[in-house]
Image (cartoon, rainbow, N blue to C red):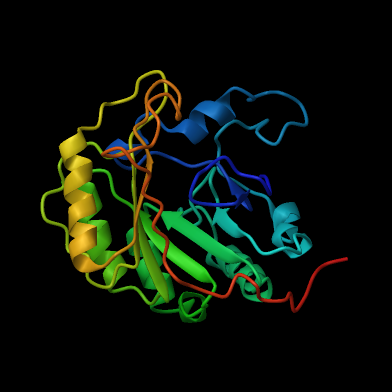
Amino acid sequence: MSDRSAIEWTDATWNPVRGCTKISPGCKHCYAERFAERFRGVPGHPFEQGFDIRLAPEKLDQPLRWRSSRRIFVNSMSDLFHDRVPTEYISRVGRVMQTANWHTFQVLTKRHERLQSLLNGELHWMGSLSNVWWGVSVEDREYGLPRIDSLRSTNARVRFLSVEPLLEDLGEVNLSAIDWVIVGGESGPHFRTMATAWVESIRDQCHKAGVPFFFKQWGGRSPKQLGRQLNGREWNGMPRASDPTMTPSYAAP
């Protein structure tokens, strides 16, 4: 949990939930699990319980204490829409995002069905927040493409795709109602290689559809090992969203 993140497409991370469970091939070499399990059993450490699901209500007010505007990645070490996270707690996270309207929040999930159900229903108000971007992870055709279709029919002001780790050629992707696409390769000791043609195909489709394209990394044993240039340049497209100069309407003492 940091107000200075090394993730290229965000400024800070906020983890009011910790831990997760695997649900698709993109989870196989989860960086968050690898990190968290190093500290299992270490007394007093935030990940003393390893990667077990745990709510962290003591972190709920953290964004309210950051007075300068930031792009904040919500739950870089978990999934807000995991079925073991109570709806009431998701709502509490949403109220913080609503109050801290000088920030832009980036919420990413693999649980697209629950995201859609809640933002189209009980938590409809959260999907309507102008300073929250809602995204789904896309790693392959079988698991990833259905998430895109689900997101497209989810109540949200800004919708984005995190195509990372990209594990195969996705073919033709329907980018209608999608506002941003991030692509990246896998990193870690057992990383799976990403082909250049797969990335170029998505970039070209984004260009044709007028969707901002962000290339995060090629991956490798470490995230920065192979750099982040594609065809000799960086691609740093971002969606237009809430005004980053917005003055805080509230800040905790």
Count of numbered marks: 0
User: Does residue 213 appear anywhere in the picture?
Assistant: yes
Decide if residue 90 is on the left or right side of residue 138: right
Decide if residue 236 is on the left or right side of residue 195: right
Nearer to us in this view, 105 or 242: 242
User: Does residue 168 appear anywhere in the picture?
Assistant: no
Q: What is the x, y in percent for residue 3?
A: 68, 49
Q: Quadrant of the C terminus?
A: bottom right
Report which quarter residue 205 is drawn in: bottom left
- Farthest residue toward the front? 232
Report which quarter residue 45 is drawn in: top right
Residue 112's place in the image compared with 157, above or below, is above
Residue in view at x 34 percent, y 73 percent? 154
Decide if residue 68 is on the left or right side of residue 228: right
Report which quarter residue 93 is drawn in: bottom right
Residue 28's place in the image compared with 59, above or below, is above
Residue in view at x 74 percent, y 61 percent? 61
Q: Quadrant of the N terminus?
A: top right
Q: What is the x, y in percent for residue 185?
A: 33, 35
Residue in view at x 74 percent, y 65 percent? 64
Residue in view at x 44 percent, y 55 percent? 108
Q: What is the x, y in percent for residue 46?
A: 70, 36
- Farthest residue toward the left? 171
Residue 250's place in the image compared with 38, above or below, is below
Nearer to us in this view, 76 or 210: 210
